[in-house]
Amino acid sequence: MKSIDKIPTGKIGRTSEMVKTGVKIGGNYLKYYGKKAFNKELTRDELDKDNAEDIYDGLKNLKGSALKVAQMLSMEKSLLPSAYVEKFSLAQFSVPPLSAPLVRKTFKNYQGAYPEDLYDSFTPNSVNAASIGQVHQATKDGRKLAVKIQYPGVADSISSDLAMVKPVAIKMFNLQGKDSEKYFKEVEGKLLEETDYKLEVEQSKFISEACANIENLRFPKYYEELSSERIITMDWMQGEHLSEFVKNDFTKEEGNKLGQALWDFYMFQMHELKAVHADPHPGNFLIDENRNLIAIDFGCIKKVPEEFYKPYFELAVPENINNRAFFLAKLSELEILRAEDTEKEIDYFSELFYEMLSLFTSPFHGETFDFSDESFWNKITELSEKYSKDTELRKMNGNRGSKHFLYINRTFFGLYNLLHDLEAKVDINNWKKYI
């Protein structure tokens, strides 16, 4: 893959890149409607493919939070056309890397020394490039290391990047009024945390030590003396990305083993630590030769406050969700229903969230759950399609729910997708043995 020698870091340079992308998309629409005039049966597939490619090409050169948003959207398989999901998923672990000279310059700016001054050996070309940083191999004192280097200007451009994507997000999610600001602040805060590599090392050590006893789960060791605000040094972990692993044949036993480790890891964090790895995409997990799961990135950790945790999981119990008075009270606690809502709004949103929560919490309703069950995924797709086409919903204010839903729902949806890819059947309460 061709490397890049510079990244636009200023607001003007980054906005210009987005404007170029906008011009290309405008051209794609003109081309589409020109063809549509002569072929009424023409679908949007070609338009979606062209737009996805142009948007991704623009974002991959910007890197940072703009590309991170694409990565987040790639997990919303029921929200976006498949062309976007396919293209945006590349942002998870396969984007153009910085060139070797730019890496060396960036490293010196961050660390005050060149890589060869700190390590016994350092590969100038990256082995893995993602949205916020890229990874290089190094050695020191006989240890094989992974060195993650943050792209220049990422932390400084988050606010302006979000301002660029804000109009698209408002339209896509039907956000209205000043209340929508709480969601953007939540995303901005998490993205800023992800650029603080000192915080990431702290979080990595906390989570990996707390979850050390979970079977078939491994973590790298982190080296604080070789890390800083923009550099992380950790053990090199040998393994295959989960997304590559699931493309090849694997046994049901292997899928169940890995799926159980993944499930236990997330349930232990959620229920015991009240802090969870909120970026469950395939690029953050490796699988070693012994079929152990390796978690390698803890930049995005979502703390789960008690006032959200309690009502959220109370609604995972069928008898609670079927008790209308209790159900409505919990919807109010979770900021889904408001004191000023009309009867029509109460009925509409209570029905919508009853359907969503009944389906989404169904894995918790028994002792085991088989994530390879296609009927579960078909129901999710059907429900998404139903409400994406609901004209009534478009008329209503989409600002529904606590800001904590953003990353908690993202966490569960990402987890479910990974378990589906592994075709795993899991023991729902197995995690409790690690308490």
Image (spheres, rainbow, N blue to C red):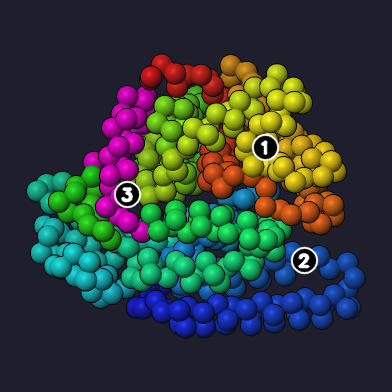
Q: CA distance from mark 1 to mark 3?
A: 34 Å
Q: Is label 2 in contact with label 1 (beta carbons under 8 Å)?
A: no
Residue under the image location 58 percent in, 68 percent down: 165
Point out residue 39 in the picture as x, y percentages from the top left corner.
88, 73
Are circles 1 and 3 on residues that touch, CB within 8 Å? no
Which of the two marks, 1 or 3, is nearer to us in this view? Answer: 1
| Left or right: 283, with 249 as reference point | left
Residue at point 26%, 58% (across, down): 229
Dot 1, crowdedness within 10 Å: few (<14), some or many (≥20)? some
Q: Is residue 337 magenta?
A: no
> Which image quarter holds the N terminus?
bottom left
The residue shown at (77%, 45%) is 341
Quick one: 435 or 284, which is closer to the camera? Answer: 435
Judging by the rendered image, the residue that carries numbered circle 2 is 44
The residue where tag 1 is placed is: 332
| Numbered mark located on residue 260 in the image | none
Q: Nearer the viewer, residue 284 or 165?
A: 165
From the viewer's perspective, is residue 18 above or below residue 432?
below
Task: Name the amino acid, label 3.
Answer: Glu
Identify the mark nearer the N-term, 1 or 3.
Answer: 3
Q: Which mark is residue 200?
A: 3
Which quadrant does the C terminus fall into? top left
Compared to 122, does 361 lie above or below? above
Q: Which element carries disc 2, helix, strand or loop? A: loop
Residue 203's x, y, as percent?
32, 43
Q: Which residues are magenta?
A: 194-221
Pick the front one: 166 or 75: 166
Amino acid type for the residue under numbered disc 1: Ser
